[in-house]
Image (cartoon, helix red, strand yellow):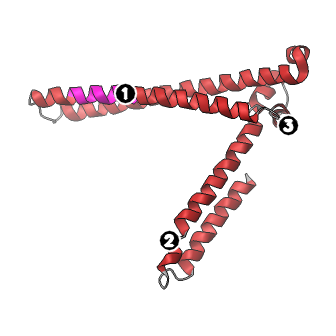
């Protein structure tokens, strides 16, 4: 986490220096801040993904091997040694599937909402109070669908990490080490 904090300090320092260095006298100094901010942000995200790829098997290691968190982190680091690309690809695959499912659900919900609104307008129904109640109910339904979607994604990721953990143990230790 220390490198991400360093990135944050550099970003804050850059913004502070741009403000203090005379953005009043030279407005081009202020124009350099957003591109630099984005560059530092991308760097921080790349670093965060690399750390995540090293530590993603810590929880399955702790659960399956009944070890402490620190030993689980070290075990995850060893198990992901030559598998970071495969783990990243599987992670992106699940993300793409979940994103596509969310887009389909969003299109269906918004289409149904538009149909209901169109029928209400054709029947010359007033917004007060039923229209506002309908909007509130639709927002609650959308929120519940979103929370269900998030729970399904979480289940998919935890299943993925458990399967990758098992696969890495078989690859690195053989079938006998994975059954222990």
Q: Secondary structure at mark 1?
A: helix
Q: Is residue 147 visible?
A: no
Q: Are marks 1 and 3 in contact (CB under 8 Å)?
A: no
Label 1 vs label 3, nearer the camera: 3
| Marks 2/3: CA–CA distance | 44 Å
Q: Which of 101/74 is in front?
A: 101
The residue beneath circle 1 is 141
Residue at the (85%, 37%) spot, across then down: 74
The mark found on residue 74 in the picture is 3
Q: Is residue 114 magenta?
A: yes
The residue beneath circle 2 is 31
User: Are there few (<14), some (14-19), or many (20+) residues within 10 Å of tag 3?
Assistant: some
Q: Is residue 137 left or right of residue 71?
A: left
Q: Is residue 89 left or right of residue 120?
A: right
Q: Is residue 110 left or right of residue 42?
A: left
- The quadrant in which residue 138 appears is top left
* Marked residue nearer the N-terminal end (1 or 3): 3
- The quadrant in which residue 96 appears is top right
Q: Secondary structure at mark 3?
A: helix
Residue at the (66%, 53%) spot, across then down: 44
Q: Which residues are magenta?
A: 105-116
Q: Secondary structure at mark 2?
A: helix
* Marked residue nearer the N-terminal end (2 or 3): 2
């Amino acid at each position: 986490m220390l490198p991400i904090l360093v990135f944050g300090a550099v970003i804050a320092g850059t913004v502070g220096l741009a403000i203090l260095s005379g953005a009043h006298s030279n407005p081009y100094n202020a124009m350099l801040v957003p591109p630099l901010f984005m560059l530092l942000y991308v760097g921080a995200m790349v670093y965060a993904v690399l750390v995540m790829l090293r530590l993603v098997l810590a929880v399955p290691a702790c659960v399956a091997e009944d070890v402490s968190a620190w030993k689980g982190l070290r075990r995850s680091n060893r198990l992901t040694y030559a598998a970071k690309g495969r783990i990243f690809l599987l992670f992106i695959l699940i993300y793409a599937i979940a994103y596509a499912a969310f887009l389909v659900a969003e299109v269906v919900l918004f289409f149904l909402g538009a149909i209901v609104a169109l029928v209400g307008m054709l029947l010359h129904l007033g917004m007060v109070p039923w229209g506002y109640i309908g909007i509130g109910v639709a927002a609650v339904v959308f929120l519940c669908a979103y929370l269900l979607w998030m729970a399904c994604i979480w289940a998919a990721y935890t299943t993925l990490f458990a399967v990758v953990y098992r696969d890495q143990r078989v690859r690195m230790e053989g079938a006998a080490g994975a059954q222990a």
